[in-house]
């Protein structure tokens, strides 16, 4: 990627607090600050109630002793080593009590917006999608939550298959699941498997794509996540796409012509520091891939109808979405409907290179009132492939009520 292509790293979504405050410009500055803080707190509380309250009373579901292979090609879900000692899913009251006591002993640290990990790694705390509770496996899924996700993905897959359309669900991992060893030292002994591990183990028949192990392996070459951002580096996104493309080509004769790019080197790029507002200095580990063959330009039609040409390596954040792209020189003469979030920002150039046309829409799993009508999008755009890219932390939200 070119330096400065940038990740869309917005933390808040929906109505911006500044818009709500526009009519209050004559209110004293102190009151504006207070109102802004209140709005922020309300947003965090609402988010946490949504994801923690819809089935919080039910018991979490442990992993089975043996996991069946995926129905997709083996390249889609390489094995990921599960952490030990698994206190939260153990069913052992004493172990759960001990882990809870250790967690509670660090309540002050967890209550802060960010947490300092090892070797300079910075993580969002629980204010961002219960991030640390998910990181250690403290927030996992109940049977009802698992069933709801499985029903959604399974029904969507069946409906699409009836129309000759393929579905691939890529869970873009949180950086704590790629660099688990860099979580704070005190978390290591209470760390367990999380929601994605549950879904993979209990529903291997669904079209999951798991890039965690590929990213863990690549992290020995160059940073796949930077220290001061929760989104993967552009190099990390390229590595993830290599596996995603291989998975799709291995799983479908129709996609056999999909060829992942060859990465020959990496280059430093400008940092995008999510934690700057908290006084955390930006790290210097933001890297982009150098490809053997450069990606070609693509025409982008934004939601407002404007059309512009993106360079082949230009990332695409949320601003133009929903957007369509056109690339006559793409690898496949196909249309892909892509339901995505901010982790798709750095993946977009590879989608543009792969498919003659893409339709990119925010899935909004984390904002249910604005979830798109997937069936209507399929009917309108007639894709051959649907890609659902979901940030791992969003699995603790209820999935869409459709299809």
Image (tube, helix red, strand yellow):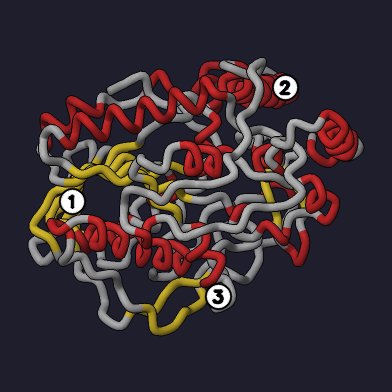
Q: Are marks 2 and 3 in contact (CB under 8 Å)?
A: no
- Quadrant holding the C terminus: top left
The answer to whether 114 is drawn above or below residue 229 in the figure is above
Query: Disc 3 versus disc 1: distance between alpha carbons?
Result: 30 Å
Q: Which residue is mark 2?
A: 34
Q: Residues within 10 Å of mark 2 (few under 14, many from 20)?
A: few
Regarding mark 2 in the picture, which secondary structure is present there?
helix
Query: Disc 2 versus disc 1: distance between alpha carbons?
Result: 43 Å
- Return the residue nearer the eye: 348 or 4: 348
| Rendered location of residue 69, percent (x, y) | 41, 51
Residue 321 seen from this side: no
Indicate which disc residue 371 carries: none
Q: Which of the 4 image quarters holds residue 217?
A: bottom right
Residue 238 seen from this side: yes
Q: Which residue is mark 3?
A: 222
Regarding mark 1 in the picture, which secondary structure is present there?
strand
Regarding mark 3 in the picture, which secondary structure is present there?
loop
- Return the residue nearer the eye: 105 or 45: 105
Residue at x 48%, y 79% (from the top left corner)? 267
Query: Disc 2 versus disc 3: distance between alpha carbons?
Result: 43 Å
Residue at x 15%, y 41% (from the top left corner)? 165
| Rendered location of residue 105, percent (x, y) | 91, 37
The answer to whether 290 is drawn above or below residue 165 in the figure is below
Indicate which disc residue 325 carries: 1
| Rendered location of residue 292, percent (x, y) | 30, 83
Residue at x 72%, y 19% (from the top left corner)? 31
**Of labels 3 and 1, the one closer to you:** 3
Q: Which of the 4 image quarters holds residue 154?
A: top left
Q: Earlier in the sequence, mark 2 or mark 1?
A: 2
| Rendered location of residue 367, percent (x, y) | 45, 25
């Amino acid at each position: 990627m070119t330096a400065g292509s940038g990740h869309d790293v917005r933390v808040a979504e929906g109505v911006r607090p500044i818009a709500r405050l526009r009519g209050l410009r004559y209110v004293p500055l102190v009151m504006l600050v207070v109102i802004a803080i209140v709005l922020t707190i309300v947003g965090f509380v609402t988010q946490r109630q949504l994801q923690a309250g819809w089935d919080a009373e039910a018991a979490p579901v442990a992993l089975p002793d043996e996991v069946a292979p995926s129905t997709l090609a083996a390249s889609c879900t390489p094995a990921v080593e599960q952490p030990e000692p698994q206190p939260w899913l153990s069913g052992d009251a004493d172990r759960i009590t001990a882990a809870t006591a250790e967690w509670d002993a660090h309540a002050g640290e967890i209550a802060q917006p960010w947490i300092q990990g090892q070797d300079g790694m910075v993580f969002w705390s629980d204010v961002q999608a219960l991030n640390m509770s998910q990181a250690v496996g403290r927030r996992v899924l109940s049977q009802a939550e698992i069933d709801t996700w499985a029903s959604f993905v399974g029904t969507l897959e069946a409906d699409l298959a009836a129309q000759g359309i393929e579905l691939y669900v890529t869970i873009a991992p949180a950086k704590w699941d790629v660099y688990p060893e860099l979580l704070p030292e005190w978390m290591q002994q209470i760390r367990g498997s999380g929601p994605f591990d549950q879904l993979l183990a209990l529903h291997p028949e669904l079209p999951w794509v798991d890039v965690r192990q590929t990213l863990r392996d690549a992290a020995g070459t160059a940073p796949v996540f930077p220290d001061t951002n929760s989104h993967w580096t552009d190099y990390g996104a390229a590595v993830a796409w290599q596996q995603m493309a291989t998975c799709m080509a291995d799983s479908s004769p129709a996609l056999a012509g999909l060829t992942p790019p060859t990465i020959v080197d990496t280059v430093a790029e400008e940092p995008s520091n999510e934690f700057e507002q908290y006084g955390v200095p930006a790290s210097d580990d933001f890297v982009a891939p150098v490809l053997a063959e450069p990606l070609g330009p693509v025409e982008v039609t934004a939601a407002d109808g404007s059309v512009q040409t993106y360079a082949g390596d230009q990332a695409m954040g949320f601003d133009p979405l929903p957007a369509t792209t056109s690339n006559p020189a793409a690898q496949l003469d196909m249309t892909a409907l892509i339901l995505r979030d901010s982790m798709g920002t750095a993946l977009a150039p590879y989608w543009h290179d792969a498919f003659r046309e893409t339709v990119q829409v925010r899935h909004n799993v984390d904002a249910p009132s604005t979830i798109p009508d997937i069936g209507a999008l399929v009917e309108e755009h007639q894709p051959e492939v649907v890609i659902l890219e979901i940030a791992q932390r969003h699995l603790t939200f209820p999935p869409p009520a459709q299809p």
